[in-house]
Image (tube, rainbow, N blue to C red):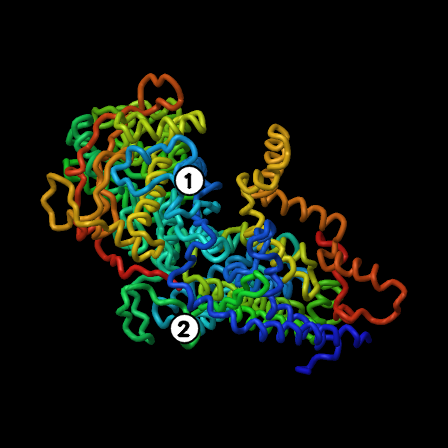
C-alpha cells in the first residue's frame, strides 16, 4: 500500500484549502457587479446563437454572415453599411461606447435544449452581454426566457410566431421581424384579388409554436374574406418526407394548399406537392393553388422552379429601393458575393438597434437598454391608437419603423411576394407584389392572438 | 467506512475530492490567455458533467454488469425531465419534489418497458428498447402535446399554479431552488488571474452524483452485483443451476432507469425546460458511446466518457473559423485558408467527426475504453512494483473483453 500517495493527496487538499483562505479578501465580485457580464477591458461580447445544422441551417448561416457584417461596421471596418442611413446618429463606428465589439457564435441545432445550452455557455463562459439569433420560434421563445432569467438582452432574429411578442413576451426580449398575424393581414387581400372569395383551404402546419400561430392567423384572415378551412394537419419539424401528408389533400375537396412550413421543410413539402401534380389539377372548377405564407429568398432558391406564381410574405427584400436597403445590399454583396436574405437583414438591423440603444442610454445595463429601445413615446403617423408609442426610427431598410413599447414588437410595412415566372438568376426568384402599409397590419397589444402574456420587469441579472 | 473496504474507501474519497474541486480543476488557464478557450469551469457545463455522469453510471449498471445493451435509455431521461418540470409548474419551485417524482415515474416506466423487453436478450433486446424510446419520442411530439407542449418544449409560465409557493408578484419567472438556495446562485473567486465559479446548482448535482456513485459502487461489490455479472458471463449456465435471471435483470433495468430519471430531473431543475429531443434515439446512442468510450463495466469509466463527450460538445464546438483564423494568422495567406478549412471540418459544428474518430480509435486500440488507457499509462510508471494498484482498480471487475459482445 502506498500511503505516500494518500498523504500527498492530503497535502494537496489542505494547500488548496489554504489557498482559498488566502484568496478570501478578493471574493465578492458578485456584489461588485451591478448587472450580469458588464464589459471589461475595452471589449464587449455579443452572442450569436443560430441554427448551423437542422432544417433551418441555411437561414442560420445567412444570419451569421449578417452578424459578422454588423460587427465589422460597428467597429468601423468595411464601408459602414446602414450606419450612414440609420436615422439615429448615436453610433460612430468606434465600437459600442468605445468598447471594441467581439462576438461568439453557437449552434442551436433548431432544438430548444441545445439552443439554451449554447446560450448559457455564451453567458456563463464567454461573458456575452446580448444574445441574438433564432430561425425557429420555438428556439427563440426558449432562449428569450433564458435571457430574461439571466438578465441579458435578447434581440430576436428570425422568429415569426405571434407568441414571441405575445403569450411569451419578455421585458428583456425584442423583435424586429414581423409576425404571423401581419402575414395574414397582408396576404388576405392579395389572395382575395387573385383567387376569389370562394375557396377551400387545406393547411399543412409545422407542429410547434410558429406553425400553430401562423396557421391560426392565416385561417382567421382567409375566413374573413370568405374562404373555408377544410382541414389542418400537423407535421413534425424533423420530417423530411411529406408525401404521406400531401396525398390526402386531393381527396379532401380543397382547392388551395397552405404550407405553414419554413426552411428545409418548406422546400421539401412544396417540391413534393408540385411533383404530385397538385398545381395542374382543377378542383371545384378552379385551378388548384399553393400558398406559402412565410417566404425567404433561401427557400425560394432551394425550391427552384416550383415556386413560380406562389404567393407569400416577407419582412424585407433586397430589391427594395430605399437608401438603407441599397447600402446594406452593397456591403453584403461586396463581402459575400450575393444579396442578403430577409433573415440576414433583420439580424443586421437588430445588432445595430442594440448598439444604438446602448449608445443612447450610455450604459450596457439591460434596464437602461430596455428603456432606450422603448423610446420616447414617438408615434407612427396615421395610426390612431393609445398603444402607438415607442422608439421610431428609419433607414434600416423597412422605411419608418416603430419599436412598440407595449410588447417590444416592431411595426413596419410588410411585403407580399410572388415566385417569379422567369427569374434571371437564382437570387431573383421572388418579385414584390405589394408593399402592404403598416396601417393595414397594425393590431392592438390585447388582440386575442397575442393575449395571455406579460412583459414583466426588466432584469439586469447579478 | 460506509461498508467499503480500505481500497474502495480511498477510491471514493478521491472521487469526492475530484468532484468537489471540479470548479478549480476545470479552470486551469488564465483568463486572458489564448488557452482560456479551453477552460470548462462554468456552471452550465459542470452541471452537465455531473448530470450526464449520473446518467452514464446508471446505464453502466445495466450494460456494464449484465451486458444488456439498452438503446432506449433516453426515454427515461425525457420522462424524468417532463415529470420534474410538471412538479415545478404545479407544486413548487423547490427542486426536491420534482426530482423524486422524476425517479418514481421513470422507475415505473422502466418496469413496464423492462418487463416486456427483457423477454429477449442480445440484439432483440436492444431493438425493443429502441422501439419503445422512439415511440415515447413520437408520442411526446404528437398526441401527448398537451402534456409535453410538443416541439416548443415544456416551459414554466407566470400563470402556473405552484400551490406550495407564495404568490409571485415580481412579474418575472421564479428560479428553481432548494429550500431557498437558488440553483443559479454562484460565488465567484478571483485567484491568480483565474475566475473560479462555485455554483449552488453544480454542488447540488455533484453531491447527488457522489451518492449515485457510492450506490453503484455498493451494487458492484454486492452479491446482487455478482449475480448480474453471472448473467453477463453465461446466462444459460445460470439457468441450469436453477437461478432465474429475469428478476435480477429486471431489477437492474429499473435501477438503471431510475438513475436516468434522476439525471433527467436534475437537467430540468438546473434549467426548467423539457424538450422531446431529449428522448430521441441520438440521445440514447450518446449514453452508449459515453459508457463504451470511458470503459464499460468499470466504475469511473462512464463518468470519464460523459465528461469527455460533453467537453467536446460544448468547448470544441465553439472553435469556429473565426477563432481558427486567429490561431493560424502566422501562416501565409493561402496556406492559412487551407489549414483553417481542414481544421474547421473537425471543430465547430464538425465536432461530431472528431468524436467519431476518437471513438473508433478507442474501440480499436483500447477496447476497455479510456480507463484501459489510463491503466496502461499507470502501469508504465509503476513497472517493477509488485503491490496492488492504489487507485481502487484492485478488486474491480475486469473490463469487458470486447464491446461488441
Q: Secondary structure at mark 1?
A: loop
Instruction: Give the residue displayed 76% in from the left and 68% down from the top.
Output: B393
Instruction: Please state which of residues A167 and B196 is positioned toward the viewer in this rendering.
Output: B196
* Residue A259 in picture, x, y percent from top left: 32, 36
Image quarter of the C terminus of chain B = bottom right
Instruction: Give the residue displayed 37% in from the left and 33% down from the top.
Output: A80
A415 to A108, vertically: above or below: above
Few, some or many residues within 10 Å of mark 2 (<14, 14–19, 20+): many
* Residue B87 in picture, x, y percent from top left: 39, 69
Instruction: Please state which of residues B45 and B229 is positioned toward the viewer in this rendering.
Output: B45
Q: Quadrant of residue A19?
A: bottom right
Instruction: Please state which of residues B255 and B16 is positioned toward the viewer in this rendering.
Output: B16
A89 to A361, vertically: above or below: above
* Residue A317 in picture, x, y percent from top left: 30, 29
B235 to B124, vertically: above or below: below
B315 to B16, vertically: above or below: above
Question: CB of mark 1 within 8 Å of CB of mark 2?
Answer: no
Res. A271 in view:
no
Q: Quadrant of residue B28?
A: bottom right
Mark seen at residue B94: 2
**Alpha carbons under labels 1 and 2: distance apart:** 45 Å
List the residue tagged with mark 1: A75
Chain letter of the residue beneath label 2 in the structure image: B
Callout in the foreground (1, 2): 1
Few, some or many residues within 10 Å of mark 1 (<14, 14–19, 20+): many
| Residue projecting furthest to the right | B384
Image quarter of the N terminus of chain B = bottom right
Q: Quadrant of residue B49?
A: bottom right
Amino acid at each position: 500500500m502506498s500511503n505516500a500517495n494518500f498523504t500527498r493527496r492530503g497535502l494537496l487538499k489542505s494547500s488548496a484549502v489554504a489557498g482559498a483562505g488566502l484568496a478570501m479578501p478578493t471574493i465578492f465580485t458578485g456584489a461588485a457587479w451591478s448587472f450580469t457580464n458588464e464589459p471589461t477591458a475595452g471589449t464587449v461580447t455579443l452572442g450569436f446563437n443560430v441554427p448551423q445544422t437542422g432544417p433551418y441551417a441555411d437561414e442560420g448561416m445567412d444570419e451569421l454572415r449578417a452578424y459578422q457584417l454588423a460587427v465589422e461596421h460597428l467597429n468601423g471596418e468595411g464601408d459602414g453599411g446602414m450606419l450612414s442611413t440609420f436615422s439615429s446618429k448615436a453610433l460612430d463606428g468606434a465600437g459600442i461606447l468605445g468598447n471594441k465589439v467581439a462576438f461568439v457564435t453557437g449552434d442551436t441545432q433548431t432544438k430548444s435544449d441545445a439552443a439554451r445550452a449554447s446560450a448559457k455557455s455564451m453567458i456563463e463562459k464567454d461573458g456575452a452581454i446580448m444574445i441574438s439569433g433564432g430561425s425557429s420560434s420555438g428556439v427563440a421563445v426558449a432562449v428569450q426566457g433564458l435571457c430574461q432569467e439571466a438578465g441579458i438582452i435578447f434581440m430576436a432574429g428570425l422568429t415569426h410566431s405571434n407568441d414571441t411578442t405575445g403569450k411569451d413576451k419578455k421585458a428583456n426580449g425584442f423583435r424586429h421581424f414581423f409576425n404571423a398575424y401581419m402575414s395574414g393581414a397582408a396576404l388576405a387581400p392579395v389572395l382575395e384579388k387573385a383567387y376569389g372569395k370562394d375557396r377551400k383551404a387545406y393547411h399543412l402546419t409545422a407542429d410547434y409554436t410558429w406553425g400553430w400561430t401562423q396557421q391560426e392567423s392565416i385561417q382567421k384572415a382567409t375566413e374573413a374574406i370568405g374562404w373555408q378551412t377544410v382541414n389542418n394537419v400537423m407535421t413534425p419539424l424533423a420530417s423530411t418526407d411529406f408525401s404521406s401528408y400531401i396525398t390526402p389533400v386531393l381527396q379532401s375537396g380543397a382547392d388551395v394548399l397552405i404550407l405553414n412550413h419554413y426552411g428545409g421543410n418548406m422546400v421539401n413539402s412544396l417540391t413534393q406537392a408540385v411533383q404530385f401534380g397538385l398545381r395542374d389539377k382543377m378542383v371545384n372548377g378552379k385551378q388548384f393553388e399553393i400558398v406559402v405564407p412565410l417566404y425567404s429568398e433561401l427557400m425560394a432558391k432551394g425550391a427552384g422552379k416550383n415556386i413560380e406564381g406562389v404567393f407569400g410574405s416577407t419582412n424585407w427584400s433586397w430589391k427594395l429601393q430605399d437608401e438603407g436597403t441599397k447600402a446594406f445590399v452593397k456591403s453584403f454583396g461586396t463581402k459575400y458575393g450575393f444579396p442578403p436574405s430577409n433573415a440576414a437583414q433583420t439580424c443586421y438591423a437588430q445588432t445595430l438597434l442594440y448598439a444604438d440603444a446602448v449608445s443612447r442610454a450610455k450604459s450596457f445595463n439591460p434596464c437602461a437598454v430596455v428603456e432606450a429601445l422603448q423610446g420616447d413615446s414617438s408615434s407612427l403617423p396615421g395610426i390612431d391608437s393609445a398603444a402607438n408609442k415607442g422608439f421610431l426610427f428609419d433607414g434600416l431598410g423597412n422605411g419608418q419603423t416603430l419599436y412598440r413599447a407595449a410588447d417590444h414588437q416592431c411595426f413596419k410595412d410588410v411585403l407580399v411576394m410572388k415566385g417569379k415566372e422567369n427569374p434571371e438568376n437564382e437570387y431573383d426568384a421572388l418579385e414584390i407584389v405589394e408593399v402592404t402599409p403598416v396601417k393595414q397590419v397594425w393590431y392592438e397589444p390585447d388582440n386575442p392572438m397575442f393575449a395571455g402574456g406579460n412583459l414583466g420587469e426588466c432584469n439586469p441579472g447579478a | 467506512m460506509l461498508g467499503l473496504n480500505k481500497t474502495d474507501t480511498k477510491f471514493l474519497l478521491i472521487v469526492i475530492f475530484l468532484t468537489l474541486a471540479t470548479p478549480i480543476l476545470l479552470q486551469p488557464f488564465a483568463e486572458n490567455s489564448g488557452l482560456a478557450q479551453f477552460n470548462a469551469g462554468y456552471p452550465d457545463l459542470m452541471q452537465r458533467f455531473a448530470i450526464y455522469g449520473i446518467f452514464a453510471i446508471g446505464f453502466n449498471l445495466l450494460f456494464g454488469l449484465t451486458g444488456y445493451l439498452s438503446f432506449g435509455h433516453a426515454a427515461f431521461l425525457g420522462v424524468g425531465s417532463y415529470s420534474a418540470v410538471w412538479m415545478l409548474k404545479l407544486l413548487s419551485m423547490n427542486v426536491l419534489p420534482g426530482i423524486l417524482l422524476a425517479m418514481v415515474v421513470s422507475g415505473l416506466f422502466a418496469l413496464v418497458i423492462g418487463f416486456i423487453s427483457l423477454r429477449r436478450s442480445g440484439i432483440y433486446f436492444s431493438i425493443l428498447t429502441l422501439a419503445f424510446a422512439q415511440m415515447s419520442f413520437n408520442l411526446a411530439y404528437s398526441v401527448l402535446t398537451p402534456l409535453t407542449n410538443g416541439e416548443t418544449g415544456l416551459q414554466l409560465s407566470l400563470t402556473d399554479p405552484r400551490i406550495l409557493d407564495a404568490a409571485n408578484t415580481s412579474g418575472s419567472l421564479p428560479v428553481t431552488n432548494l429550500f431557498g438556495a437558488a440553483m443559479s446562485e454562484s460565488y465567484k473567486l478571483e485567484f491568480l488571474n483565474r475566475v473560479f465559479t462555485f455554483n449552488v446548482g453544480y454542488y447540488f448535482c455533484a453531491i447527488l452524483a457522489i451518492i449515485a456513485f457510492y450506490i453503484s459502487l455498493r451494487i458492484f461489490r454486492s452479491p446482487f452485483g455478482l449475480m448480474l455479472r453471472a448473467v453477463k458471463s453465461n446466462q444459460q449456465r445460470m439457468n441450469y443451476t436453477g437461478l432465474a435471471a429475469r428478476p435480477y435483470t429486471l431489477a437492474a433495468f429499473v435501477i438503471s432507469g431510475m438513475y436516468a430519471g434522476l439525471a433527467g430531473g436534475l437537467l430540468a431543475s438546473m434549467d426548467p425546460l423539457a424538450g422531446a429531443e431529449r428522448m430521441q434515439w441520438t440521445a440514447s446512442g450518446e449514453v452508449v458511446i459515453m459508457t463504451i468510450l470511458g470503459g464499460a463495466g468499470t466504475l469511473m469509466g462512464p463518468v470519464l466518457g460523459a465528461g469527455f463527450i460533453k467537453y467536446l460538445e460544448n468547448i470544441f464546438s465553439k472553435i469556429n473559423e473565426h477563432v481558427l483564423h486567429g490561431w493560424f494568422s502566422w501562416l501565409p495567406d493561402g496556406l492559412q485558408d487551407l489549414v483553417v478549412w481542414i481544421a474547421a471540418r473537425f471543430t465547430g459544428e464538425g465536432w461530431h467527426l472528431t468524436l467519431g474518430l476518437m471513438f473508433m480509435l478507442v474501440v480499436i486500440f483500447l477496447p476497455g475504453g479510456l480507463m484501459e488507457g489510463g491503466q496502461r499509462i499507470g502501469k508504465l510508471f509503476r513497472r517493477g512494483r509488485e503491490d496492488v494498484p492504489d487507485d481502487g482498480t484492485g478488486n474491480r471487475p475486469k473490463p469487458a473483453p470486447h464491446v461488441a459482445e
